[in-house]
Amino acid sequence: RQLEQERIADELHDGIARQLTTIAIQVKVLGRTDDPALRGVSQQAIADSSARALADVRRVLQLGGGHDQESVSLEDWNATVAQEVAALRSQGYDVVADAVATPPLSSVVSATLVRILREAVHNVRTHEPTTAQILIEVSHEGDEVELSVTNGPPRSPGHSEEHRELAGGYGLVRLTERVRALGGQLGAGATHDGGWCVRGRVPIA
């Protein structure tokens, strides 16, 4: 019972809460700009996030009915990267991605990478809505796979502090627990140029 509750809580955070946060941020942007291009980007982000939130509600309801949503294939990982990169670019971010996962990964490892990526991207949108660049990288060393998501400093100094009230620490805490349970490590911290990096290492086997 507790495990099921934790899984549902994770789904609520990973999906619905993230989309609602994005909507809240973009609504603030709409209220502060008359730039037609920026308003168009914000309106599209709100529409996309609303659709995703509805899909996430359906997924959570399926979880409550006992359907297993944890299995994520390598193809889902690659598709997730493509979707996240496209969404970020449509919102004005400069994204560089070198994130093809080879050799083939187990469904558990792929699911973990997907969660790390979505959490990192969500945090960039929340904390650094004006960041200059985002770098997404996957590398392999020995029997481990490493995913890093690094964003540069914000274009507008002080802009990120304005959005910290909208974010909580639940996501990274739960992800750290998941990664450690697999024998891996997860860390997040500031970069030398004032940006931020989330990096996770997970055993392939």
Image (cartoon, rainbow, N blue to C red):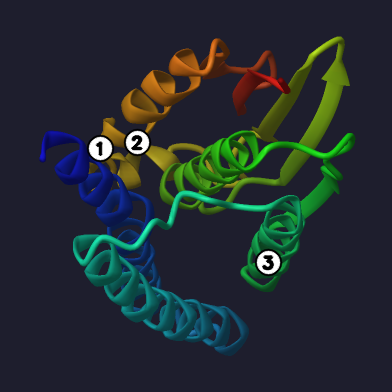
156 in relation to 30, above or below: above
Q: Are marks 2 and 1 in contact (CB under 8 Å)?
A: yes
Nearer to me, 121 or 83:
83
Q: Earlier in the sequence, mark 1 or mark 3?
A: 3
Residue 128's spot in the image, x, y percent? 51, 44
Q: Residue furthest left?
A: 1
Side of 133 where 104 appears, left or right: right
Q: Amino acid at mark 1?
A: Gly
Q: Residue at x 29, y 43 (%)?
A: 167
16 in relation to 107, above or below: below
Side of 201 where 180 appears, left or right: left
Q: Amino acid at mark 3?
A: Gln
Residue 193's spot in the image, x, y percent? 69, 20
Quarter of the figure with residue 110: top right
Side of 117 where 73 appears, left or right: right
Q: Residue tagged by mark 1?
A: 168
Q: Residue tagged by mark 2?
A: 171
Q: Amino acid at mark 2?
A: Gly
Camera-nearest label, 1 or 3: 3
Q: Residue furthest front?
A: 66
Q: Are marks 3 and 2 in contact (CB under 8 Å)?
A: no
Res 158 label: none
Residue 205's spot in the image, x, y percent? 71, 20
Q: Residue tagged by mark 3?
A: 83
190 in relation to 78, above or below: above
Quarter of the figure with residue 150: top right
Q: Residue at x 27, y 73 (%)?
A: 57
Q: Residue at x 39, y 56 (%)?
A: 68
Q: Marks 3 and 2, how far apart in space?
A: 20 Å
